[in-house]
Structure formats: C-alpha cells, structure tokens
Amino acid sequence: MNLRLDTTAESIPTAAYTVRRGVPADAADLASFAARTFTDTYGEYNSPANLAMHLTSTYSLAQQTRELGDAGIVTLLAHRYAQLVAYAQVRRGPPPPCVGGAAPVELLRFYVDKSHHGAGVAQRLFEEARRAAAALGGAELWLKVWERNPRAIAFYRKCGFVDVGVADFFVGVDRQTDRVLVLDLRDGPARTPS
Ligand SMILES: CC(C)(COP(=O)(O)OP(=O)(O)OC[C@H]1O[C@@H](n2cnc3c(N)ncnc32)[C@H](O)[C@@H]1OP(=O)(O)O)[C@@H](O)C(=O)NCCC(=O)NCCS
C-alpha cells in the first residue's frame, strides 16, 4: 500500500517527518534509496559506465550493511509515514588538508528525495546530523559537494558552512572537483535556514 499522501512538498509540516538512527536491517531500503537519489542528482552528468561503477562500490547492499553496522558512522534516516525520504551520514575520518581545526567530523552524505526538496525535511535532518557530529566529538563539521551543484551549496551556506577549498571526487574513473565546506560546531545551536 502506498502511504504517500497527495500533498505538495511545500505544504508538509516539518513535524510530519521522523528522524532516527539507521540500523543494519535498514540496509536494503537505504541502498536502493541512496542509489536512486545519487542517480537523480548526478546521473545526467556521468557516463553510464562511471555511474554504474560508483553505485556498485558505494551503494551496494553489502556496503550499506557495513556502513550501518560501523560504530564510527552515524546514519540518520528521515521518514514520512513509512517511507524513507532523506538520509544523512556523519563519520570521523581524515579530512583534506584545507580543513583545519581540532576535531573535524565529516558530513559524508546528505540526500533528500526530490519530491521533498524545499519541504523543510533537509533542515530537520541537518539539525540531527549536526547533533550527531557533536556527539562524535566533532568541533568542526566538513563536507565535499560537487562544484556544479548550486542548490546543495546554497543550502549548506544557509546552514552556516564556509568554503575552504577544493578536493577530488571520483565517479568511476572520472575525477571531478568538489568544493570543501566547513561549519564550526562551537558557534552555538544550528541555524535554522528557512
Ligand atoms: C541539497 C538538499 C539536501 C537541500 O535540501 P532542500 O530542501 O532542497 O533545501 P532548501 O530548499 O531549503 O534550500 C535550497 C536553496 O537553494 C536554492 N536553489 C535552488 N535551486 C538553485 C540553483 N539552481 N542555484 C542556486 N540556488 C538554488 C533554493 O532557492 C534554496 O534557497 P532559498 O531558501 O534561499 O530560496 C536537496 O536539494 C537534495 O537532496 N539535493 C539532491 C542531493 C544533493 O545534492 N545532496 C548534496 C550532496 S553533497
């Protein structure tokens, strides 16, 4: 049964979304959602071969099962009713040289289903991701975003991130340039971008 209501994204109250930590039992749902949202976002800019390579290495059931069971990675899932509509992953990991700071934590992935863009779930999920980063001991939250993804860059700027440089990102064998953005977690509570 499809529980999605026939409601425009703009009219959905933020409280209608639930956010919880993912567990290995979520792997199948997450793997398929993550592959679909990556393809929706970047599919048209990559060759089918490079895209397939990336989806296999990053969003396979085995890989997502591993990540969901990894204590160093926090995966957050946002649902509307029983439907997965967004996810975020936060982890400790070595940052690129342009990220300074005492205790950097990475916002590894942050994806909202396109039918929920602009609905407020991104803000709700980001608040939880920020909390998770602080709980991992982070003093700075950093991320990489493709230089030609203006909507994501605009969203992160609204959240308070600043641009500190560039880093490579590979889709298959294609080397692309990402902007590297950093948010100081000690600046107080999350901004709530409207
Ligand atoms: C990035 C993402 C999480 C942001 O969530 P969202 O609900 O779309 O965010 P918002 O609508 O609150 O904010 C996006 C902002 O970008 C603006 N925007 C939209 N299209 C834009 C464009 N082409 N160029 C510049 N800004 C743009 C919007 O107007 C909005 O700013 P405003 O609130 O000042 O008007 C979501 O769009 C998404 O999941 N995108 C696909 C996956 C992705 O790119 N993930 C990031 C990977 S690093």
Image (cartoon, rainbow, N blue to C red):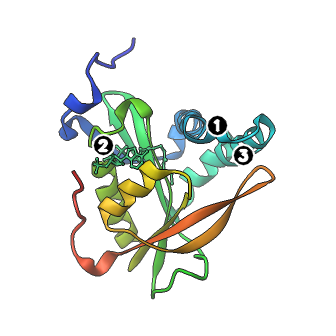
Q: Which residue lies most toward the bottom here?
A: 102
Position of residue 169 measured from the top left corner of the image (x, y, whole percent): 67, 60
- The image position of residue 151, as x and y in percent, is 42, 48
User: First in sequence: mark 3 or mark 2?
Assistant: 3
Question: What is the secondary structure assignment of the residue under circle 1?
Answer: helix
Is mark 1 in CB contact (under 8 Å) with mark 2? Answer: no
> What amino acid type is highlighted by mark number 3?
His
Horizontal placement of 36 versus 56: left or right?
left
Do the CB atoms of the residues marked 1 and 3 lie less than 8 Å apart? Answer: no
- Amino acid carrying label 1: it is Gly
Provide the residue designation for mark 2: 121
Q: Is mark 1 within 8 Å of ligand 1?
A: no
Residue 121 to residue 100: above or below? above
Frontmost residue, 105 versus 72: 105
Distance of mark 1 from mark 3, alpha carbons?
Answer: 11 Å
Q: Secondary structure at mark 3?
A: helix
Nearer to the camera, 27 or 41: 41
**Marks 1 and 3, the one that precedes in the sequence:** 1
Q: Secondary structure at mark 2?
A: helix
Image x and y of residue 187, in percent: 26, 78
